[in-house]
Image (cartoon, grey):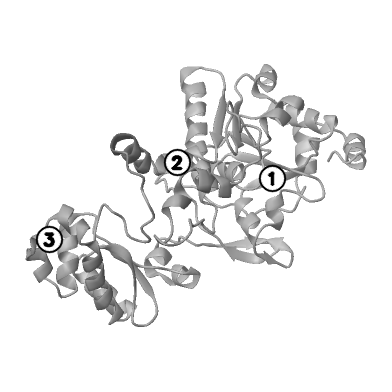
């Protein structure tokens, strides 16, 4: 296996829960050495989050892939000093402390960069620095609410709907990952110093939902919930099949809409100006939806999908986990490899995304036990002797 793109880059993951640590996961898949800093005794709260098997958090097992785990209590000055020493050896430091805590503990970027001018520091918070909410605690749920996502999601006559997965954290992590890469490029190619990256849980998701703001700013309209419909195309919905499954269909292009109408046995709608012209078809979306829904409801998922695939209609099954793992296309691409693990035996997790042809990312191992690399990092990297490590352990620092 050739060196991966980030071989030689050291990342210090001193954040907790989802967004910040997910950035370190992405970097680790591409070859970076990732040192995960966790609270002694309990570790990252993500270890106890969500589904467990024999007391082992399954989400953390995946999130902690390719990372080395050390324990460090930043509430102690000796712990903060260790973090500073680790940061002096790192290319990237990921933090998610509140801004006031970062300053009070002497862990702000200007101070750390005195010992390591090339340090790229990623600071992920709920609200970002500089505003009246900067120091408030924030979680992905609040980002999903304040970004405008929840307002747009759900039935027109129902409440705003929050996702049951880490949407805001994921959007923030993807944004932060490319920001880290830009900062490293600027440092290494342009000969610049490191810098501070400020990412919060609202703005990355809000950027994907910008159209309602544009519409309000220019037209004075406030976008409302439309369920699974979208007022830019019709038909566009989720449809229930005869055997109790669901499929999603999107006719974002006019040619797809024509194919869809013909596939469901309604070629007459393609000749009617109310349905053939895109703008007028949107005004008639309930009738278009009803025609597709009635046709799908009279067929099994396999039968409906066979017709749509033959007609080159943009449709797809709505998968649950068993269907994801059974899909022949995803199997062919090895999207969910089975990774050996000393605690679980093995576990299927999602493969790295994206895929590079010459230097693909890979999963070396799943999350290690808490503090599994204390001796390697504190004894080897920082050169602390055994007596000093024992003293720090007894003091609750590591």
Q: Position of residue 225 (x, y in %)?
A: 39, 55
Circle 3 sits in a helix, a strand or a loop, which is it? helix
Q: Residues within 10 Å of mark 2 (few under 14, many from 20)?
A: many
Name the residue tied to disc 2. 206
Q: Is residue 353 visible?
A: no
Residue 203 pos. (x, y %) = 48, 37
How far is mark 1 from mark 2, CA to CA?
33 Å
> Is residue 133 in view?
yes
Q: Nearer the viewer, mark 3 or mark 1?
A: 3
| Pointer 3 with pointer 1, Cβ within 8 A | no
Q: How many marks?
A: 3
Q: In the figure, 11 relative to 145: above or below?
A: above
The picture quadrant where one finds residue 104 is top right
**Quadrant of residue 157 in the image?**
bottom left
Report which residue position mark 1 lands on: 68
Q: Are marks 1 and 2 in contact (CB under 8 Å)?
A: no
C-alpha span from label 3 to label 1: 61 Å
Q: Nearer the viewer, residue 97 or 195?
A: 97
Q: The C terminus is located in which quarter?
A: top right
Q: Residues within 10 Å of mark 3 (few under 14, many from 20)?
A: some
Q: Residue at x 21, y 66 (%)?
A: 288
Q: Give me the C-alpha separation between circle 2 and circle 3.
A: 34 Å
Q: Which residue is mark 3?
A: 274
Residue occupying the point 67% across, 29% down = 99
Q: Is residue 371 above or below residue 243?
A: above
Would residue 27 be found to the left or right of residue 342 on screen?
A: left
Label whose residue precedes the other's in the sequence (2 or 3)? 2
């Amino acid at each position: 296996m050739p060196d991966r793109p980030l071989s030689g880059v050291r990342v210090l993951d001193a954040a907790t829960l989802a967004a910040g640590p997910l950035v370190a996961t992405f970097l680790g898949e591409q070859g970076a050495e990732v040192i995960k800093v966790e609270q002694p005794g309990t570790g990252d709260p993500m270890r106890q989050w969500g589904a467990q098997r024999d007391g082992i958090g399954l989400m953390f097992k995946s999130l902690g892939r390719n990372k080395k785990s050390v324990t460090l209590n930043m509430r102690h000055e000796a712990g903060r000093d260790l973090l500073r020493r680790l940061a002096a050896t790192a290319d990237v430091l990921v933090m998610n402390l509140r801004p006031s805590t970062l300053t009070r503990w002497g862990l702000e970027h200007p101070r750390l960069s005195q010992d390591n001018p090339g340090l790229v520091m990623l600071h992920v918070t709920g609200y970002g620095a500089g505003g009246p909410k900067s120091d408030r605690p924030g979680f992905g749920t609040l980002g999903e609410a304040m970004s405008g996502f929840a307002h747009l999601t759900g039935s027109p006559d129902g409440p705003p709907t929050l996702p049951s997965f880490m949407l805001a954290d994921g959007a923030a992590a993807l944004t932060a990952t490319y920001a880290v890469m830009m900062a490293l490029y600027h440092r290494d190619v342009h000969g610049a110093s490191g810098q501070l990256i400020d990412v919060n849980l609202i703005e990355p998701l809000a950027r994907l939902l910008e159209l309602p703001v544009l519409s309000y700013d220019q037209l004075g309209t406030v976008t409302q919930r439309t369920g699974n419909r979208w007022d830019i195309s019709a038909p566009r919905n989720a449809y229930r099949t005869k055997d109790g499954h669901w499929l999603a269909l999107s006719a974002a292009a006019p040619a797809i809409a024509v194919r869809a109408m013909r596939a469901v046995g309604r070629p007459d709608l393609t000749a009617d100006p109310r349905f053939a012209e895109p703008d007028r078809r949107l005004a008639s979306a309930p009738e278009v939806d009803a025609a597709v829904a009635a046709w799908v409801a009279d067929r099994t998922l396999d039968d409906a999908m066979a017709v749509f695939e033959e007609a080159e209609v943009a449709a797809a099954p709505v998968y649950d986990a068993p269907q994801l793992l059974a899909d022949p296309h995803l199997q062919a691409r090895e999207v969910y490899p089975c990774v050996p693990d000393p605690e679980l035996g093995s576990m299927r997790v999602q493969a790295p995304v994206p895929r590079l042809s010459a230097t693909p990312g890979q999963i070396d191992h799943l999350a290690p036990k808490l503090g599994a690399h204390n001796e390697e990092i504190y004894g080897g990297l920082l050169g602390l002797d055994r007596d000093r490590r024992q003293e720090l352990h007894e003091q609750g620092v590591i």
